Amino acid sequence: MKAHEDGQRPIKAKAYLIEPEELRVIWMNGSARRDCPDIDPDTIDGIPLDVAVPLARTMGVEHALRAVSDTGTSQNLHTSVITTRKGTLGLAASIYRLPDGKILMLIENAWQIKGRMTDRRSSL
């Protein structure tokens, strides 16, 4: 049963497992795969980062991935995508090095309402 059929909202945050040497995506969750309909889910192993995450270059993801891989220190990125009178819709990425050396990247929407100091997040 799908999550939305049993009254739960589907997971919309995108998760990517990245091989750090060549920065190739070796796994992605269902939400991330929905953004890449031309990619066969059975052949995900080794997808170029810019194919799996089209905004990677805009967000500076490659630099952050290399820094996380080299240092083990997690990185958080944010970029504005749409600005309205009420606020800004952006993308937030959190990047972590796993114990086996691979990198986990999570991406979600970040909605910032004008005049509020806190970041209100909602899934993509």
Image (cartoon, helix red, strand yellow):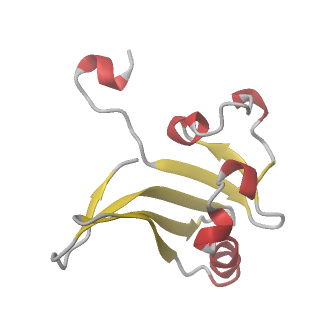
Task: From this view, report whether residue 29 is shown above or below residue 91.
Answer: above
In the rendered image, the quadrant that contains the N terminus is top left
Q: In the figure, residue 121 lies in which quadrant?
A: bottom left
Which of the pair 61/90 is nearer the observer? 90
Which residue is located at x 49 percent, y 57 percent?
Answer: 107
Which of the pair 36/95 is nearer the observer? 36
Q: In the figure, residue 66 lies in which quadrant?
A: bottom right
Which residue is located at x 67 percent, y 44 percent?
Answer: 27
Which residue is located at x 60 percent, y 79 percent?
Answer: 72
Task: From this view, report whether residue 57 is shown above or below residue 74.
Answer: above
Percent position of residue 54, x then y: 66, 55
Left or right for 50, reference 76: right
Percent position of residue 44, x then y: 75, 38
Percent position of residue 78, x then y: 46, 72
Which residue is located at x 54 percent, y 68 percent?
Answer: 95
Q: In the figure, residue 9 lies in which quadrant?
A: top left
Left or right for 115, reference 43: left
